[in-house]
Image (cartoon, grey):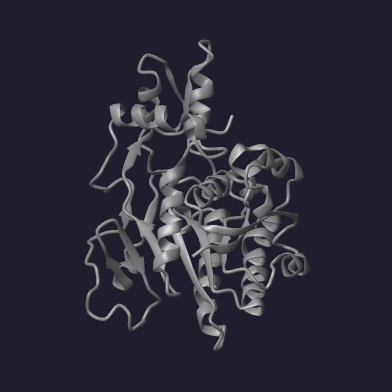
């Protein structure tokens, strides 16, 4: 059955790909795109999959910081809210902490309160591996956002609202990510690849897989869950060599707030975690859903100790397939 969707940050890399998926599968009766940048909304309207279905779209300029605007834009007939709006660049968020808190924390609180007021059926927060054992402000604000979303299942009262989280790793080719940077550097023969630390590892997920994951989480969610996919990792040096094995590499040093390796599940969270074939689900501590079928793990689920690594050939193939998605 077709539903009405409200997507914050709908003009971002993920938002656009998820909207394209909704159109492809004919799942949407109405799509409301809520974002701050009028130019990005204009560019989204020009895309073929939007332009051909423009009658089902509503575009609202607004900021999740502004609760009154959220209240006005979120119609009473909305079935699903996808919350992907956030300030995400680690160096920028470290330099602008107050602004990051306003968007990522206060903005999420505003969204939760509006969804409860409107009695929205399903609200799903798109989170990040940086929310696990955070060492930077971005991760700390996303962890807080996750807690706000999960806690909403308690203070919603008797309303039908359900709130859940999906948390995944680096999105291949998303705006500001490492692969578009390396591809750009590869075009200039006079400069080397710049890498912060040759030991660095990251989880990897494509935009297509991230969109499919969110759609599957919407189908399964009952409220309170943190969904985590089982993802492959890659080493940053292997990634660079998959683009050009002959290009020189310059080590520039790890940036402020950056980890050598990322985590998707902390060691402590495994006591509240159930495992499935392709994903994990973390439930709140003490939740009866867990019963005795918990997942046993010696350490955290991190990109360094991960069993599945992408080799150079696999990375090269994935990059070629995803070129159309990379932001220039």
- Establish if 292 lies above or below 219: below
Residue 135: image location, x then y, percent: 49, 54
- Establish if 166 lies above or below 198: below
Residue 47: image location, x then y, percent: 63, 38
Residue 84's image quarter? bottom right
Residue, x 65% and y 54% (percent of image)? 56
- Establish if 327 lies above or below 45: above
Q: Quadrant of the C terminus?
A: top right
Query: Does residue 187 appear to the left or right of 248 in the view shown?
Result: right
- Establish if 15 lies above or below 189: below
Towards the viewer: 92 or 226: 226
Residue, x 66% and y 41% (percent of image)? 51
Q: Residue furthest top?
A: 190
Residue 71: image location, x then y, percent: 73, 70
Towards the viewer: 263 or 109: 109
Q: Residue furthest bottom?
A: 158
Residue, x 37% and y 14% (percent of image)? 246
Residue 58's image quarter? bottom right
What is the count of numbered marks?
0
Residue 94: image location, x then y, percent: 62, 49
Query: Does residue 157 appear to the left or right of 209 in the view shown?
Result: right
């Amino acid at each position: 059955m077709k539903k009405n969707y409200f997507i914050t940050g709908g003009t971002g890399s993920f938002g656009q790909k998820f909207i394209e998926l909704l159109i492809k599968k004919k799942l949407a009766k109405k799509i409301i795109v809520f974002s701050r940048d009028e130019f990005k909304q204009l560019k989204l309207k020009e895309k073929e999959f939007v332009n051909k279905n423009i009658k089902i779209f509503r575009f609202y300029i607004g900021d999740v910081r502004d609760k009154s605007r959220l209240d006005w834009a979120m119609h009473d007939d909305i079935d699903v809210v996808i919350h992907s709006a956030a300030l995400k660049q680690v160096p920028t968020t470290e330099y602008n902490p107050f602004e990051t808190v306003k968007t990522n924390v206060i903005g999420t609180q505003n969204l939760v309160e509006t969804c409860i007021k409107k009695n929205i059926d399903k609200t799903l927060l798109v989170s990040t591996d940086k929310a696990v054992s955070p060492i930077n402000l971005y991760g700390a604000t996303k962890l807080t956002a996750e807690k706000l979303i999960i806690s909403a299942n308690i203070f919603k009262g008797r309303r039908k609202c359900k709130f859940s989280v999906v948390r995944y790793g680096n999105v291949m080719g998303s705006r500001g990510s490492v692969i578009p940077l390396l591809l750009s550097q590869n075009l200039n023969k006079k400069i080397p690849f710049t890498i912060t630390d040759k030991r660095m590892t990251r989880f990897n997920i494509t935009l297509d897989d991230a969109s499919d994951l969110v759609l599957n989480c919407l189908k399964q969610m009952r409220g309170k869950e943190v969904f985590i996919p089982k993802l492959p990792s890659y080493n940053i040096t292997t990634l660079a060599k998959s683009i050009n094995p002959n290009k020189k590499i310059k080590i520039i040093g790890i940036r402020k707030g950056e980890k050598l390796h990322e985590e998707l599940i902390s060691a402590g969270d495994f006591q509240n975690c159930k495992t499935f074939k392709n994903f994990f689900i973390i439930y709140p501590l003490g939740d009866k859903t867990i019963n005795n079928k918990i997942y046993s793990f010696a350490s955290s689920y991190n990109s360094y100790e991960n069993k599945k690594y992408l080799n150079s050939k696999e990375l090269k193939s994935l990059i070629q397939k995803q070129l159309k998605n990379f932001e220039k």
